[in-house]
Amino acid sequence: MIQWRTGVVDEVRGRWSGVVEYAARLPTGEQVRALGYVDIVGELAPGTRVLLNTTALERGLGTGGLAIVVAAPDHLPPARDVASFHGHVVKARYTPSQTMVLGVDEQDSEHHAVLADADDLSGMPVVVADLHSALPAVIAGARAIRPGTRIAYVMTDGGALPIQFSRTVAGLRDAGWLEASITVGQSFGGDLEAVNVHTGLLAARHVVGADLVVVSQGPGNLGTGTRWGFSGTSAGEAVNAAWTLGGRPVCSLRVSEADPRERHRGVSHHSLTAYGRVALVPADVPVPTLDGPFGERVREQARRLCEAGGDRLTLHEVACDGLDEALRASPVGLSTMGRGYDDDRASFLGAAVAGRYAAGLLAR
């Protein structure tokens, strides 16, 4: 189901890399927030008539609960000579908004020769996380002990497909905390485009020259409250890809002390399922040394996770000293499931210790 609405742009409310947020007025007189991706619809002036997709807005969804500008029928972007465009990788395939990109790994790419036979990450640490909100915390943890680390981000297609939706990535790039972003699968808009997680990881190593990679889905993960019905299973698949290519997978645990849902308290069932059941290869599991009964609960859950995997998963208790300061110094806001740092400190420390541990591997 798609809810189509027409509207008129009232004003520009804000902008970040590749995105403009508009206030658009519906025929009913209601004013709504509407995102326009510049590469898709161009820059729109007040008074422009627009076609909107309001499905998520009307459903009241969280992360994506706003209108999306599909097109401005009277102000279409200039036509391009498709024949002169070298890329042929189509993303968001066979949808009305499908887009063509030049993949880093395809024949017309300047990097094709580098990646044609690339098959090894040479032990590069790959931190895998469930939620997009873990990204700045992982990087903060890594930079706390190795400030000059070259970090790349591989975004999978479990959440938002356009990376421009993420203010986090834009802010981390602007601050110099992130060397490059790579969009894989159906996601698009990164500094580099890749066909899948495997070539995305190889591009991070051999094209970007990254020391460390973070892999997660984009903003807006999907969950159904069932054992297997959540988009974060892709975290386990990314662990498999990293190990298969000779990388060092590091599992960032999704931890919460404030989530009202019991299945996400302590170590989330998403992490327990993705790393315990979907991932099938050796990996490191850093766990924060939190205080009190909650800290012991998290460590016990992590111990059970690793024990259930036999000798496949290795538990590492990682101290949190200095990480509060590192996290508060983040150039982008820290927020997960609508909760900030002071609301759910354990969530961000759980991700930060994965970054700290992964960066520590670089010194060995």
Image (cartoon, rainbow, N blue to C red):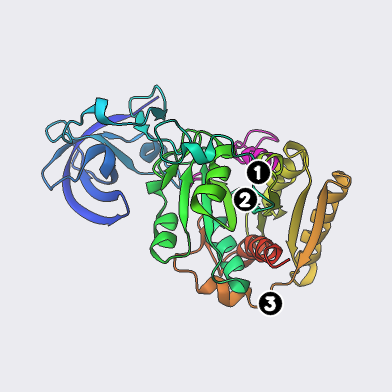
Three-letter amino acid code at the position of disc 2:
Ala
Q: CA distance from mark 3 to mark 2?
A: 21 Å
Above or below, comparing residue 237 to residue 287 in the picture: above
Residue 202's spot in the image, x, y percent?
57, 43
- For label 1, the SS is loop
Query: Quarter of the image holding residue 41?
Result: top left
Three-letter amino acid code at the position of disc 1:
Asp
Q: In the rendered view, does 100 fall on the left or right side of 208?
A: left
Three-letter amino acid code at the position of disc 3:
Asp
Residue at the location (81% across, 65% down)? 296
The number of callouts visible is 3
Q: Which residue is mark 1?
A: 120
| Earlier residue among tags 3 and 2 | 2
Query: Looking at the rendering, in which quadrant would you find the N terminus?
Result: top left
Residue 245's spot in the image, x, y percent?
67, 41
- For label 2, the SS is loop
Residue at the location (77% across, 41% down)? 281
Question: Is residue 236 inside the magenta stretch?
Answer: yes
Q: Which residue is mark 3?
A: 321
Q: CA distance from mark 2 to mark 1?
A: 21 Å
Above or below, comparing residue 151 to residue 148 in the picture: above
Q: Which residue is mark 2?
A: 129
| Earlier residue among tags 2 and 1 | 1
| Earlier residue among tags 3 and 1 | 1
Q: Which residues are magenta?
A: 218-240
Instruction: Answer few, some or many: residues within 10 Å of disc 2's Cα (few below 14, many 20 plus, some between 14 and 19).
Output: many
Q: CA distance from mark 3 to mark 1?
A: 34 Å
Residue 181's spot in the image, x, y percent?
46, 50
Q: In the rendered view, does 234 fall on the left or right side of 163?
A: right
Along the line of sight, which residue is nearer the eye, 363 or 284? 363
Instruction: Answer few, some or many: residues within 10 Å of disc 1's Cα (few below 14, many 20 plus, some between 14 and 19).
Output: some
